[in-house]
Amino acid sequence: MKTFDAIIIGAGQAGPSLAEKLSEAGRTVAFVERKLFGGTCVNTGCTPTKAMVASAYAAHLASRASEFGLELGGPVRVDMGRVMARVDAIVAKSRTGVEGWIRCLKGCTVYEGHARFEGPDSVRVGDELLTAPQVFINVGGRATVPDMPGISSVPYLTNSSILKLKQVPEHLVVIGGSYIGLEFGQIFRRLGAKVTVIEKVGRLISREDEDISAAVMEILEAEGIDVRVDSTCISFAPHVDGVEVGIKCDEGEPSVVASQVLLAVGRRPNTDDLGLDKAGVVTDGRGYITVDDELRTNVPGIWALGDCNGRGAFTHTSFNDFEIVAANVLGEAPRCVSDRISAYALYTDPPLGRAGMSEGEARKSGRPLLIGKMPMTRVGRAVEKGETKGFMKIVVDASTKEILGAAILGVGGDEAIHGVLDMMYAKAGYDVLQRSVGIHPTVSELIPTMLGEMQPG
Protein backbone atom coordinates (compact mmCIF):
# COMPACT_ATOMS: atom_id res chain seq x y z
CA MET A 1 0.00 0.00 0.00
CA LYS A 2 1.22 3.45 -0.97
CA THR A 3 0.06 6.44 1.06
CA PHE A 4 -0.66 9.92 -0.27
CA ASP A 5 -2.39 13.05 0.95
CA ALA A 6 -4.86 12.88 -1.95
CA ILE A 7 -5.95 10.62 -4.79
CA ILE A 8 -7.42 12.14 -7.95
CA ILE A 9 -9.23 9.83 -10.36
CA GLY A 10 -9.58 11.17 -13.90
CA ALA A 11 -7.68 13.69 -16.02
CA GLY A 12 -10.63 15.73 -17.25
CA GLN A 13 -10.96 19.48 -16.84
CA ALA A 14 -11.07 19.55 -13.02
CA GLY A 15 -8.47 16.92 -12.14
CA PRO A 16 -5.19 18.39 -13.45
CA SER A 17 -5.90 21.86 -12.05
CA LEU A 18 -6.74 20.37 -8.67
CA ALA A 19 -3.54 18.31 -8.73
CA GLU A 20 -1.52 21.46 -9.39
CA LYS A 21 -3.24 23.37 -6.60
CA LEU A 22 -2.72 20.57 -4.07
CA SER A 23 0.88 20.12 -5.19
CA GLU A 24 1.59 23.81 -4.73
CA ALA A 25 0.18 23.50 -1.20
CA GLY A 26 2.74 20.79 -0.43
CA ARG A 27 0.35 17.84 -0.66
CA THR A 28 1.37 14.50 -2.15
CA VAL A 29 -0.97 13.38 -4.90
CA ALA A 30 -1.66 10.08 -6.67
CA PHE A 31 -3.16 10.84 -10.06
CA VAL A 32 -4.98 8.03 -11.87
CA GLU A 33 -6.02 8.02 -15.54
CA ARG A 34 -7.14 4.88 -17.32
CA LYS A 35 -7.11 6.05 -20.94
CA LEU A 36 -6.69 9.52 -22.48
CA PHE A 37 -5.39 12.54 -20.61
CA GLY A 38 -7.57 15.60 -21.05
CA GLY A 39 -10.92 13.90 -20.63
CA THR A 40 -13.99 14.41 -22.81
CA CYS A 41 -13.32 18.04 -23.70
CA VAL A 42 -9.88 17.47 -25.17
CA ASN A 43 -10.45 14.08 -26.78
CA THR A 44 -14.06 13.74 -27.90
CA GLY A 45 -15.79 16.99 -26.95
CA CYS A 46 -15.00 20.68 -27.27
CA THR A 47 -11.56 20.52 -28.87
CA PRO A 48 -12.25 18.16 -31.81
CA THR A 49 -15.82 19.30 -32.46
CA LYS A 50 -15.00 23.01 -32.50
CA ALA A 51 -12.07 22.29 -34.80
CA MET A 52 -14.56 20.53 -37.10
CA VAL A 53 -16.99 23.45 -36.77
CA ALA A 54 -14.18 25.71 -38.02
CA SER A 55 -13.58 23.55 -41.10
CA ALA A 56 -17.31 23.35 -41.80
CA TYR A 57 -17.63 27.13 -41.44
CA ALA A 58 -14.76 27.65 -43.89
CA ALA A 59 -16.46 25.37 -46.40
CA HIS A 60 -19.78 27.14 -45.93
CA LEU A 61 -18.25 30.60 -46.29
CA ALA A 62 -16.35 29.53 -49.40
CA SER A 63 -19.61 28.29 -50.92
CA ARG A 64 -21.05 31.80 -50.38
CA ALA A 65 -18.06 33.59 -51.90
CA SER A 66 -20.09 35.13 -54.72
CA GLU A 67 -22.26 36.95 -52.14
CA PHE A 68 -19.14 38.88 -51.14
CA GLY A 69 -18.04 39.63 -54.69
CA LEU A 70 -15.54 36.78 -54.93
CA GLU A 71 -15.17 34.05 -57.55
CA LEU A 72 -13.29 30.92 -56.45
CA GLY A 73 -13.40 29.03 -59.72
CA GLY A 74 -15.68 26.11 -58.96
CA PRO A 75 -17.50 24.24 -56.22
CA VAL A 76 -15.86 23.71 -52.84
CA ARG A 77 -14.18 20.32 -52.53
CA VAL A 78 -13.77 18.75 -49.09
CA ASP A 79 -10.81 16.51 -48.27
CA MET A 80 -12.16 14.76 -45.17
CA GLY A 81 -8.84 13.09 -44.50
CA ARG A 82 -7.14 16.47 -44.20
CA VAL A 83 -10.00 17.87 -42.15
CA MET A 84 -9.62 15.08 -39.61
CA ALA A 85 -5.82 15.21 -39.71
CA ARG A 86 -6.07 18.84 -38.60
CA VAL A 87 -8.50 17.88 -35.85
CA ASP A 88 -6.29 15.01 -34.68
CA ALA A 89 -3.21 17.24 -34.55
CA ILE A 90 -4.99 19.82 -32.40
CA VAL A 91 -6.29 17.11 -30.06
CA ALA A 92 -2.92 15.39 -29.78
CA LYS A 93 -1.15 18.64 -28.91
CA SER A 94 -3.67 19.43 -26.18
CA ARG A 95 -3.65 15.88 -24.77
CA THR A 96 0.14 15.75 -24.69
CA GLY A 97 0.22 19.12 -22.97
CA VAL A 98 -2.16 17.97 -20.23
CA GLU A 99 -0.20 14.77 -19.61
CA GLY A 100 3.14 16.56 -19.52
CA TRP A 101 1.74 19.14 -17.10
CA ILE A 102 0.55 16.50 -14.65
CA ARG A 103 3.73 14.43 -14.82
CA CYS A 104 5.86 17.48 -14.03
CA LEU A 105 4.01 18.43 -10.85
CA LYS A 106 6.10 18.16 -7.71
CA GLY A 107 4.82 15.50 -5.34
CA CYS A 108 2.44 14.06 -7.94
CA THR A 109 2.71 10.39 -8.98
CA VAL A 110 0.83 9.32 -12.13
CA TYR A 111 -0.78 5.88 -12.37
CA GLU A 112 -2.18 4.66 -15.68
CA GLY A 113 -4.96 2.13 -15.26
CA HIS A 114 -8.47 1.58 -14.04
CA ALA A 115 -9.16 2.85 -10.52
CA ARG A 116 -11.55 0.92 -8.27
CA PHE A 117 -12.37 1.65 -4.66
CA GLU A 118 -11.62 -1.00 -2.05
CA GLY A 119 -12.76 1.23 0.80
CA PRO A 120 -13.55 4.88 1.51
CA ASP A 121 -9.84 5.80 1.58
CA SER A 122 -8.28 3.12 -0.61
CA VAL A 123 -8.15 2.71 -4.39
CA ARG A 124 -6.64 -0.14 -6.41
CA VAL A 125 -5.00 0.49 -9.79
CA GLY A 126 -3.82 -2.80 -11.26
CA ASP A 127 -1.40 -4.29 -8.75
CA GLU A 128 -1.06 -1.05 -6.82
CA LEU A 129 -3.12 -0.25 -3.72
CA LEU A 130 -3.26 3.47 -2.95
CA THR A 131 -4.60 5.13 0.17
CA ALA A 132 -5.30 8.75 1.08
CA PRO A 133 -7.57 10.64 3.47
CA GLN A 134 -8.97 12.63 0.54
CA VAL A 135 -10.20 11.20 -2.78
CA PHE A 136 -11.46 13.29 -5.69
CA ILE A 137 -13.52 11.62 -8.42
CA ASN A 138 -13.39 13.27 -11.86
CA VAL A 139 -14.32 10.43 -14.22
CA GLY A 140 -16.58 12.21 -16.71
CA GLY A 141 -19.24 10.57 -18.85
CA ARG A 142 -19.97 8.89 -22.15
CA ALA A 143 -22.71 8.67 -24.76
CA THR A 144 -25.94 6.93 -23.85
CA VAL A 145 -26.95 4.06 -26.13
CA PRO A 146 -30.72 3.68 -25.66
CA ASP A 147 -32.50 0.36 -25.96
CA MET A 148 -34.35 1.31 -29.15
CA PRO A 149 -35.93 -1.40 -31.33
CA GLY A 150 -33.29 -2.95 -33.59
CA ILE A 151 -30.34 -0.91 -32.34
CA SER A 152 -28.32 -4.02 -31.51
CA SER A 153 -28.66 -5.28 -35.09
CA VAL A 154 -27.07 -2.29 -36.85
CA PRO A 155 -23.82 -0.30 -36.76
CA TYR A 156 -24.02 3.15 -35.22
CA LEU A 157 -21.81 6.07 -34.26
CA THR A 158 -21.53 8.09 -31.06
CA ASN A 159 -19.89 11.46 -30.47
CA SER A 160 -16.61 9.56 -29.96
CA SER A 161 -16.60 7.12 -32.88
CA ILE A 162 -17.83 9.69 -35.41
CA LEU A 163 -14.49 11.45 -34.96
CA LYS A 164 -12.81 8.48 -36.63
CA LEU A 165 -14.58 8.99 -39.97
CA LYS A 166 -12.19 9.69 -42.82
CA GLN A 167 -14.88 10.16 -45.48
CA VAL A 168 -17.96 12.34 -45.58
CA PRO A 169 -21.05 10.15 -45.08
CA GLU A 170 -23.45 9.91 -48.00
CA HIS A 171 -26.44 10.25 -45.68
CA LEU A 172 -25.95 10.86 -41.97
CA VAL A 173 -29.05 10.31 -39.85
CA VAL A 174 -28.77 11.95 -36.43
CA ILE A 175 -30.92 10.56 -33.64
CA GLY A 176 -31.47 13.40 -31.17
CA GLY A 177 -32.24 17.04 -31.83
CA SER A 178 -30.23 18.64 -29.06
CA TYR A 179 -26.79 20.22 -28.73
CA ILE A 180 -24.44 17.42 -29.80
CA GLY A 181 -26.69 16.14 -32.57
CA LEU A 182 -27.33 19.55 -34.09
CA GLU A 183 -23.66 20.53 -34.07
CA PHE A 184 -22.61 17.34 -35.85
CA GLY A 185 -25.58 17.55 -38.21
CA GLN A 186 -24.62 21.01 -39.43
CA ILE A 187 -20.92 20.14 -39.58
CA PHE A 188 -21.46 17.20 -41.91
CA ARG A 189 -24.10 18.96 -44.00
CA ARG A 190 -21.61 21.76 -44.66
CA LEU A 191 -18.95 19.20 -45.51
CA GLY A 192 -21.24 17.70 -48.15
CA ALA A 193 -23.35 15.00 -46.53
CA LYS A 194 -27.08 14.62 -46.80
CA VAL A 195 -28.32 14.97 -43.21
CA THR A 196 -31.55 14.03 -41.46
CA VAL A 197 -32.13 14.93 -37.80
CA ILE A 198 -34.72 12.85 -35.98
CA GLU A 199 -36.16 14.08 -32.68
CA LYS A 200 -38.71 12.22 -30.58
CA VAL A 201 -40.44 15.27 -29.08
CA GLY A 202 -42.21 18.09 -30.88
CA ARG A 203 -39.29 20.51 -31.30
CA LEU A 204 -35.52 20.78 -31.30
CA ILE A 205 -33.51 21.66 -28.16
CA SER A 206 -36.67 21.42 -26.08
CA ARG A 207 -35.07 22.94 -22.97
CA GLU A 208 -34.94 26.26 -24.81
CA ASP A 209 -37.82 28.65 -25.46
CA GLU A 210 -40.05 27.79 -28.40
CA ASP A 211 -38.95 30.82 -30.45
CA ILE A 212 -35.32 29.72 -30.16
CA SER A 213 -36.18 26.13 -31.13
CA ALA A 214 -38.11 27.38 -34.16
CA ALA A 215 -35.33 29.74 -35.25
CA VAL A 216 -32.64 27.03 -34.98
CA MET A 217 -34.83 24.64 -36.97
CA GLU A 218 -35.34 27.27 -39.66
CA ILE A 219 -31.58 27.88 -39.87
CA LEU A 220 -30.81 24.18 -40.26
CA GLU A 221 -33.56 23.54 -42.79
CA ALA A 222 -32.37 26.51 -44.87
CA GLU A 223 -29.05 24.68 -45.24
CA GLY A 224 -30.79 21.56 -46.53
CA ILE A 225 -30.99 19.53 -43.32
CA ASP A 226 -34.17 17.45 -43.10
CA VAL A 227 -35.59 17.79 -39.57
CA ARG A 228 -38.17 15.28 -38.37
CA VAL A 229 -39.75 16.03 -35.00
CA ASP A 230 -42.54 14.13 -33.22
CA SER A 231 -40.79 10.95 -34.31
CA THR A 232 -42.81 8.48 -32.30
CA CYS A 233 -41.58 5.16 -33.68
CA ILE A 234 -37.80 5.32 -33.99
CA SER A 235 -36.39 1.91 -34.91
CA PHE A 236 -33.49 0.39 -36.82
CA ALA A 237 -33.01 -2.44 -39.29
CA PRO A 238 -30.15 -3.54 -41.56
CA HIS A 239 -30.40 -2.35 -45.16
CA VAL A 240 -28.33 -3.10 -48.23
CA ASP A 241 -27.30 0.59 -48.33
CA GLY A 242 -26.69 0.94 -44.60
CA VAL A 243 -29.39 1.27 -41.95
CA GLU A 244 -33.12 1.73 -42.34
CA VAL A 245 -34.33 4.10 -39.65
CA GLY A 246 -38.00 4.06 -38.74
CA ILE A 247 -39.40 7.48 -37.90
CA LYS A 248 -43.18 7.65 -37.62
CA CYS A 249 -46.00 5.17 -37.46
CA ASP A 250 -48.89 7.34 -38.64
CA GLU A 251 -47.82 10.19 -40.98
CA GLY A 252 -45.03 11.36 -43.26
CA GLU A 253 -42.33 9.16 -44.71
CA PRO A 254 -42.22 6.16 -42.36
CA SER A 255 -38.46 5.60 -42.69
CA VAL A 256 -35.20 6.79 -44.20
CA VAL A 257 -32.09 4.88 -45.24
CA ALA A 258 -28.84 6.07 -43.68
CA SER A 259 -25.29 5.33 -44.71
CA GLN A 260 -24.37 6.12 -41.08
CA VAL A 261 -26.40 6.68 -37.92
CA LEU A 262 -25.27 8.97 -35.10
CA LEU A 263 -26.79 8.44 -31.67
CA ALA A 264 -26.92 11.78 -29.84
CA VAL A 265 -29.57 11.17 -27.21
CA GLY A 266 -27.78 12.02 -24.00
CA ARG A 267 -24.88 11.18 -21.72
CA ARG A 268 -24.29 8.90 -18.77
CA PRO A 269 -21.64 9.12 -16.03
CA ASN A 270 -18.63 6.78 -15.91
CA THR A 271 -19.46 5.61 -12.40
CA ASP A 272 -20.67 2.06 -12.90
CA ASP A 273 -17.26 0.39 -12.66
CA LEU A 274 -15.50 2.33 -9.88
CA GLY A 275 -16.50 0.12 -6.96
CA LEU A 276 -18.39 3.00 -5.37
CA ASP A 277 -20.39 0.52 -3.30
CA LYS A 278 -17.20 -0.54 -1.50
CA ALA A 279 -16.57 3.08 -0.55
CA GLY A 280 -20.21 3.62 0.41
CA VAL A 281 -20.65 6.47 -2.08
CA VAL A 282 -24.29 7.13 -3.01
CA THR A 283 -25.45 7.68 -6.60
CA ASP A 284 -28.85 8.64 -7.97
CA GLY A 285 -31.03 6.58 -10.28
CA ARG A 286 -29.05 7.61 -13.36
CA GLY A 287 -25.65 6.82 -11.82
CA TYR A 288 -24.61 10.39 -10.99
CA ILE A 289 -22.73 10.76 -7.71
CA THR A 290 -24.81 12.63 -5.17
CA VAL A 291 -23.00 15.72 -3.84
CA ASP A 292 -23.78 18.71 -1.63
CA ASP A 293 -23.31 22.39 -2.44
CA GLU A 294 -19.54 22.06 -1.92
CA LEU A 295 -19.34 18.87 -4.03
CA ARG A 296 -18.81 16.54 -1.08
CA THR A 297 -20.28 13.07 -1.37
CA ASN A 298 -22.05 11.35 1.51
CA VAL A 299 -18.70 9.80 2.52
CA PRO A 300 -16.36 12.15 4.44
CA GLY A 301 -13.14 12.71 2.51
CA ILE A 302 -14.59 11.95 -0.96
CA TRP A 303 -15.60 14.60 -3.50
CA ALA A 304 -17.02 14.30 -7.03
CA LEU A 305 -16.22 16.85 -9.74
CA GLY A 306 -17.24 17.33 -13.35
CA ASP A 307 -19.77 15.46 -15.43
CA CYS A 308 -20.05 12.53 -13.01
CA ASN A 309 -21.82 14.58 -10.33
CA GLY A 310 -24.79 15.71 -12.40
CA ARG A 311 -24.33 19.35 -11.39
CA GLY A 312 -23.12 20.53 -14.79
CA ALA A 313 -22.19 18.97 -18.11
CA PHE A 314 -19.74 21.49 -19.47
CA THR A 315 -16.01 22.11 -19.40
CA HIS A 316 -16.52 25.46 -17.70
CA THR A 317 -18.68 23.96 -14.94
CA SER A 318 -16.09 21.23 -14.41
CA PHE A 319 -13.36 23.83 -14.02
CA ASN A 320 -15.56 25.74 -11.59
CA ASP A 321 -15.99 22.49 -9.65
CA PHE A 322 -12.21 22.46 -9.23
CA GLU A 323 -12.27 26.05 -8.00
CA ILE A 324 -15.00 25.27 -5.46
CA VAL A 325 -13.30 22.16 -4.10
CA ALA A 326 -9.80 23.67 -4.00
CA ALA A 327 -11.00 26.78 -2.17
CA ASN A 328 -12.85 24.79 0.47
CA VAL A 329 -10.26 22.04 0.95
CA LEU A 330 -7.36 24.48 1.25
CA GLY A 331 -9.16 26.87 3.57
CA GLU A 332 -9.54 29.76 1.15
CA ALA A 333 -12.68 31.90 0.85
CA PRO A 334 -15.55 29.39 0.76
CA ARG A 335 -17.28 28.71 -2.56
CA CYS A 336 -20.32 26.65 -3.56
CA VAL A 337 -22.23 25.43 -6.60
CA SER A 338 -25.29 27.53 -5.84
CA ASP A 339 -23.24 30.67 -6.55
CA ARG A 340 -22.98 29.57 -10.17
CA ILE A 341 -25.22 31.06 -12.86
CA SER A 342 -26.25 28.66 -15.58
CA ALA A 343 -24.51 29.56 -18.84
CA TYR A 344 -23.65 27.62 -21.97
CA ALA A 345 -23.59 27.76 -25.77
CA LEU A 346 -24.86 25.74 -28.70
CA TYR A 347 -22.16 25.79 -31.38
CA THR A 348 -24.24 25.66 -34.47
CA ASP A 349 -23.65 28.56 -36.85
CA PRO A 350 -24.83 31.04 -35.82
CA PRO A 351 -24.20 30.02 -32.21
CA LEU A 352 -26.59 30.33 -29.31
CA GLY A 353 -25.23 31.93 -26.14
CA ARG A 354 -27.36 31.42 -23.03
CA ALA A 355 -27.18 32.83 -19.50
CA GLY A 356 -29.51 32.42 -16.55
CA MET A 357 -33.22 31.70 -16.93
CA SER A 358 -35.04 31.16 -20.19
CA GLU A 359 -38.18 33.18 -20.77
CA GLY A 360 -40.24 30.12 -19.94
CA GLU A 361 -38.43 29.58 -16.65
CA ALA A 362 -38.81 33.26 -15.74
CA ARG A 363 -42.56 33.14 -16.39
CA LYS A 364 -42.90 30.10 -14.14
CA SER A 365 -41.18 32.03 -11.33
CA GLY A 366 -44.23 34.30 -11.08
CA ARG A 367 -42.18 37.50 -11.15
CA PRO A 368 -43.31 40.62 -13.02
CA LEU A 369 -41.23 40.66 -16.19
CA LEU A 370 -39.80 42.99 -18.75
CA ILE A 371 -38.75 41.30 -21.98
CA GLY A 372 -36.57 42.67 -24.74
CA LYS A 373 -36.07 41.11 -28.15
CA MET A 374 -34.15 42.24 -31.22
CA PRO A 375 -33.62 40.52 -34.58
CA MET A 376 -30.04 40.24 -35.79
CA THR A 377 -31.11 42.10 -38.93
CA ARG A 378 -30.91 45.27 -36.79
CA VAL A 379 -27.31 44.57 -35.73
CA GLY A 380 -24.89 46.42 -37.98
CA ARG A 381 -22.06 43.95 -37.43
CA ALA A 382 -24.29 41.05 -38.50
CA VAL A 383 -25.43 42.91 -41.62
CA GLU A 384 -21.85 43.77 -42.59
CA LYS A 385 -20.75 40.16 -42.18
CA GLY A 386 -23.75 38.88 -44.12
CA GLU A 387 -24.87 36.80 -41.13
CA THR A 388 -28.24 38.16 -40.00
CA LYS A 389 -29.98 35.00 -38.86
CA GLY A 390 -31.27 34.79 -35.29
CA PHE A 391 -32.15 37.27 -32.57
CA MET A 392 -31.27 38.51 -29.09
CA LYS A 393 -33.56 38.29 -26.08
CA ILE A 394 -33.30 39.38 -22.46
CA VAL A 395 -35.60 38.86 -19.47
CA VAL A 396 -35.65 41.19 -16.46
CA ASP A 397 -37.48 41.34 -13.13
CA ALA A 398 -39.57 44.49 -13.51
CA SER A 399 -39.73 45.21 -9.79
CA THR A 400 -36.07 44.71 -8.80
CA LYS A 401 -34.36 45.44 -12.18
CA GLU A 402 -32.48 42.13 -11.80
CA ILE A 403 -31.39 40.54 -15.06
CA LEU A 404 -32.86 37.03 -14.95
CA GLY A 405 -31.54 35.63 -18.19
CA ALA A 406 -30.63 36.22 -21.81
CA ALA A 407 -30.19 34.41 -25.09
CA ILE A 408 -28.23 35.53 -28.14
CA LEU A 409 -28.79 33.38 -31.21
CA GLY A 410 -26.65 35.03 -33.81
CA VAL A 411 -23.16 35.83 -35.00
CA GLY A 412 -20.86 36.20 -31.98
CA GLY A 413 -23.64 35.19 -29.61
CA ASP A 414 -21.38 32.88 -27.62
CA GLU A 415 -19.06 35.83 -26.88
CA ALA A 416 -21.55 38.70 -26.59
CA ILE A 417 -23.56 36.86 -23.93
CA HIS A 418 -20.70 37.36 -21.47
CA GLY A 419 -21.46 41.06 -21.12
CA VAL A 420 -24.86 40.13 -19.74
CA LEU A 421 -23.45 37.28 -17.66
CA ASP A 422 -20.88 39.58 -16.06
CA MET A 423 -23.61 42.02 -15.02
CA MET A 424 -25.59 39.15 -13.51
CA TYR A 425 -22.59 38.07 -11.41
CA ALA A 426 -22.03 41.68 -10.36
CA LYS A 427 -25.71 41.77 -9.28
CA ALA A 428 -26.11 45.05 -11.13
CA GLY A 429 -29.54 46.18 -12.29
CA TYR A 430 -30.32 46.18 -15.99
CA ASP A 431 -30.25 49.97 -15.95
CA VAL A 432 -26.48 49.87 -15.37
CA LEU A 433 -25.98 47.82 -18.54
CA GLN A 434 -28.49 49.99 -20.40
CA ARG A 435 -26.37 53.08 -19.73
CA SER A 436 -23.13 51.44 -20.89
CA VAL A 437 -21.49 52.60 -24.11
CA GLY A 438 -20.46 49.70 -26.31
CA ILE A 439 -17.94 49.65 -29.13
CA HIS A 440 -19.23 50.07 -32.68
CA PRO A 441 -19.67 47.97 -34.73
CA THR A 442 -20.23 44.98 -32.45
CA VAL A 443 -23.07 42.69 -31.49
CA SER A 444 -22.78 43.72 -27.85
CA GLU A 445 -23.42 47.41 -28.55
CA LEU A 446 -27.09 46.62 -29.33
CA ILE A 447 -27.78 45.07 -25.93
CA PRO A 448 -28.36 48.47 -24.24
CA THR A 449 -30.69 49.41 -27.10
CA MET A 450 -32.64 46.20 -26.60
CA LEU A 451 -32.91 46.92 -22.87
CA GLY A 452 -34.34 50.34 -23.67
CA GLU A 453 -37.06 48.76 -25.79
CA MET A 454 -38.27 46.14 -23.28
CA GLN A 455 -41.98 45.57 -22.84
CA PRO A 456 -43.95 44.03 -19.96
CA GLY A 457 -44.09 40.27 -20.42
Image (spheres, helix red, strand yellow):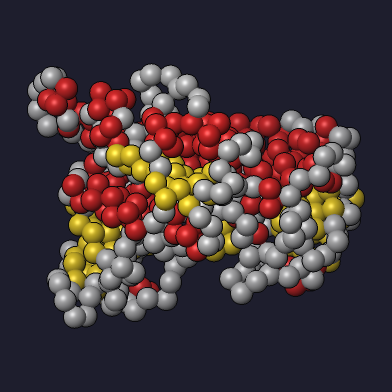
**The C terminus sits in image quarter:** bottom left
- Measured from the top left, where is residue 18 in percent x and y? 74, 41
142 left or right of 12 in image: left
Displayed quadrant of residue 59:
top left
Picture residue at 68% right of the left edge, 32% below the top: 101
Picture residue at 85% right of the left edge, 57% below the top: 301
287 left or right of 251 in image: right
User: From the viewer's perspective, is residue 147 above or below residue 85?
Assistant: below
Could you tell me if residue 55 is visible in this image? no
**The N terminus sits in image quarter:** bottom right
- Measured from the top left, where is residue 285 in percent x and y? 61, 74
Displayed quadrant of residue 245:
bottom left
- Measured from the top left, where is residue 216 in percent x and y? 30, 50
272 left or right of 164 in image: right
Picture residue at 62% right of the left edge, 69% below the top: 287
Picture residue at 66% right of the left edge, 32% below the top: 100
Question: Which of the two residues, 405 or 220, is positioned nearer the viewer here?
Answer: 405
- Measured from the top left, where is residue 453 in percent x and y? 38, 38
